Amino acid sequence: MMQDNMQPVQDMDVAISSRVRLARNLEAYPFSTRMTRAHGAEILEKVKKAIFSDSGPDFSSGFTYYDMNAMKPLDRQLLVEKHLISPEFAEGQNERAAIISRDERVSILVNEEDHLRLQCIYPGMQLAKAWKRCDELDTRLDAKLGFAFDNVSGYLTCCPTNAGTGIRASVMLHLPALSMTGYIKNVLETCSKIGVAVRGAYGENSEASGNMFQISNQVTLGQTEEEIITGISNITSQISNQERMLRNELYRQNPQRFEDRIFRSLGLLQNARIMSSEESQKLLSDVRLGVIMGLIRHVDLKKIDNMMLMIQPAYLQKLAGVELRPDERDVRRAELLRKNLDPGGML
């Protein structure tokens, strides 16, 4: 998701984005593991009607409907890269659709693992704001669709680990200093002990490319939504403070070595003619750290964060207007990085 111009930079030095996701099922239909394609088609129509017949201000007119089976694989992958749908949802074969707000802050996945996945994502450390918008959407749709709910178990979900509140609250953190020093292992161990999941940028089973880590709750039952939001906010704030303290300590101990790493990475990005996605993410992570520390002044943080999206395979091909082979993408990626990072604008 492209960054919001109004978001203050001070909390975005570590926090890239905040996301709240709710798992919901319609009470009149079996879970996805038991339902037929006809059930899936009926659910699609009901959700579509609930959203696009809503006469509330800025509601139905603020969403776009994406039929997954009618979309090209490249277009589906672009939505994955923007964190609007999951990789599993993009590759599914059932009757499914994504309904996405024009500002791309809200995405409603229909017939994923559950009948509905409601997601709200905001830049920076804004979990409370993401939860507020998600809660309002949840209340509105529940009144129209009727969600499966039990007075003891809470919201009923296909996977028992999502039952109760059905909420996943997560913050995407950029943690280069913790990764450089190896202290990230301590963070991972501590989070595991207290029931907090740490994953890569694209969720479960994804790698932490570019030193991006997604911190989220594992427990959805036995706590209120507000308690979960507060808990993840507190944990991510503590991790963010550790990252800030460590990066400052690294610079204090050996400023020449610190600056050498930053400017070597910048130099490669400014001059390379071939650049893989993995290498560019790693180098951009260093440059992002240099921008945060005030060492690189001709590039702002928003531009770096946008480039981390633009260098992804599907996004590159959409910019090019044609499908590209992997080697062609590596050349295009290098061109894009040189153009955006060279202060003189020379290619």
Image (cartoon, rainbow, N blue to C red):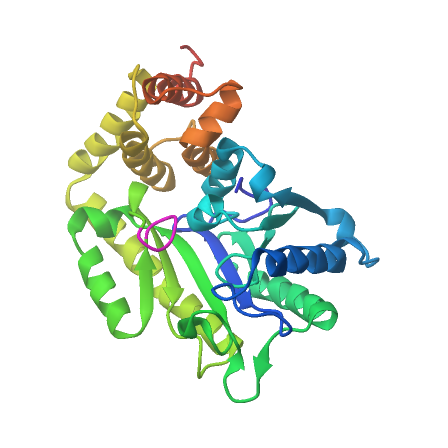
**Percent x, y of residue 78:** 50, 36
Is residue 90 found left or right of 236 in the rendered image? right
Residue 102 visible in the picture: no
Q: Which residue is drawn at 50% across and 66% down?
A: 34
Main SS category, magenta section: loop
Residue 62 lies, in percent from the top left, at 73, 48
**Camera-side residue of 75 and 180:** 75
Viewer-proximal residue, 21 or 294?
A: 21
Residue 341: where, in percent of width, then height? 40, 23
Q: In this view, does 97 lie above or below 141?
A: above
Verify whether residue 341 appears in magenta.
no
Q: Quadrant of residue 128?
A: bottom right
Q: Is residue 329 left or right of residue 70?
A: left
Q: Which residue is drawn at 58% across and 80% down?
A: 149
Which residue: 60% across, 49% down? Answer: 97
The question of residue 204 being in magenta is answered with yes
Q: How many marks?
A: 0
Q: Is residue 12 above or below residue 257?
A: below
As drawn, 332 above or below 185: above
Q: Can residue 92 be seen in this view?
A: yes
Q: Which residue is drawn at 51% across and 38% down?
A: 76
Q: In this view, does 25 lie to the left or right of 73?
A: right
Left or right: residue 27 versus residue 11 is right
**Range covered by the magenta-colored residues:** 200-205
Residue 343, quarter of picture: top left
